[in-house]
Amino acid sequence: MHLVIGSAGYAGRSAIAALGAHFPVRGVELGEDLGVAMAGVDTVHLATDLHPPLRRLRREAEPDPALVEILRAARQAGVRRLVHLSTAQVLGPAPRTVLLESNPPRPDHLYEKLHARDEHWLLLQRGIEVVILRPAQGFGLGEPISERLLSALAHGRPLLVAGARRRTFLAGSDLGRAFVAAALRGRPGHSYLLGGFTSTWAELFKVAAVALKVPVRFAEVPYDLLYLRTALREWRTPPGRVCWPNRYVVDVLGRGHLLEDGISRRELSWSPTIGSFEEGLGELIEGIKSRRLRGRPERAEGESLTGREPT
């Protein structure tokens, strides 16, 4: 039996779909009774992001309490393996080079540092096999950055950056298949880099604009000025609240991040099947169209809308 924690989210839905083709699988959310959910489970897949990238995060030296509780419950239930979803962003920025599996973590933003901290802590634990996945930037329904951007595009709001820098993207379905590979062939104590295809945010905007039948507009702001204004907004946002965009998002949109994951592909016997946005955007586009028919979504408390000047 396999258990997916965070099964209702972007990565969790993909994991459930892929794992279900190979194993008995069930899902659970944080806050539910993990002890009951883990009864009889061989492998736990932690597919939720414990550090939501759109929120102002807290700097803490200790591992996330939810992660500590998950590991405690897994040990008590006799779980053999934990597959932990991290991010390729723990390797840090790489505006002019390609990041390799051999690169040590060099996190820059707090989002990256918290993931690197949790990785380090997990790999020191004993009594359970730990396999870590470091996927490239995702896109699709439920992925916070791409969904927020394309929702703004669909409602005619100008986007802050042209997104011309090249980076590696990974479709949700390919991430789901990586959970299967990690369960079957991942080596305990190892981290695996997961690349997909190379493209740009600009290409994502273009493909989505065609599908949604809307123009793409940019409120071009110089990067340094945008970063400064974003830092000010982030400073004024209470911890735990959404801050859009924050400095991490600005760098994800404005800086390149290319991955070379050949070793991981060979060891996991895994490779991506989605090689373009045209192949992988269908579910998100349909979701946005459906929401447009129901009316404009409300702004969540504490958020700033994409394309509007930071205040």
Image (tube, rainbow, N blue to C red):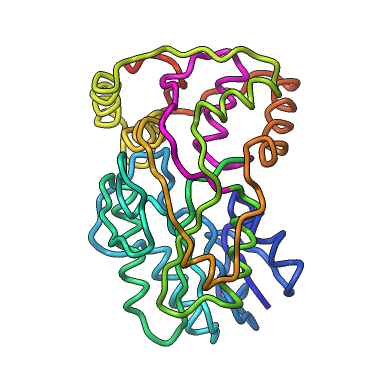
Residue at 59% over, 74% down: 183
Q: Is residue 250 magenta?
A: no
Q: Judge left or right: residue 287 versus residue 96.
A: right
Q: Position of residue 180 (x, y in %)?
A: 63, 69
Q: Is residue 157 magenta?
A: yes
- In this rendered view, identify the residue nearer to me: 212 or 199: 199
- Magenta stretch: give its range: 141-170
Q: Judge left or right: residue 134 versus residue 309.
A: right
Relative vertical location of residue 24 with respect to residue 226 in this rendering, above or below: below
- Total labels: the figure holds 0
Q: Quadrant of the C terminus?
A: top left
- In this rendered view, identify the residue nearer to me: 287 or 274: 274
Which of the 4 image quadrants contains residue 66?
bottom left
Which of the 4 image quadrants contains residue 270?
bottom right
Q: Position of residue 301 (x, y in %)?
A: 46, 28
Residue at 45% over, 80% down: 188
Residue at 41% over, 46% down: 258
Q: Judge left or right: residue 109 versus residue 140.
A: left
Q: Position of residue 232 (x, y in %)?
A: 24, 25
Relative vertical location of residue 168 with respect to residue 104 in this rendering, above or below: above
Q: Quadrant of the N terminus?
A: bottom right
- In this rendered view, identify the residue nearer to me: 82 or 277: 277
Relative vertical location of residue 241 with respect to residue 275 in this rendering, above or below: above
Relative vertical location of residue 248 with respect to residue 36 in this rendering, above or below: above
Residue at 55% over, 21% down: 152
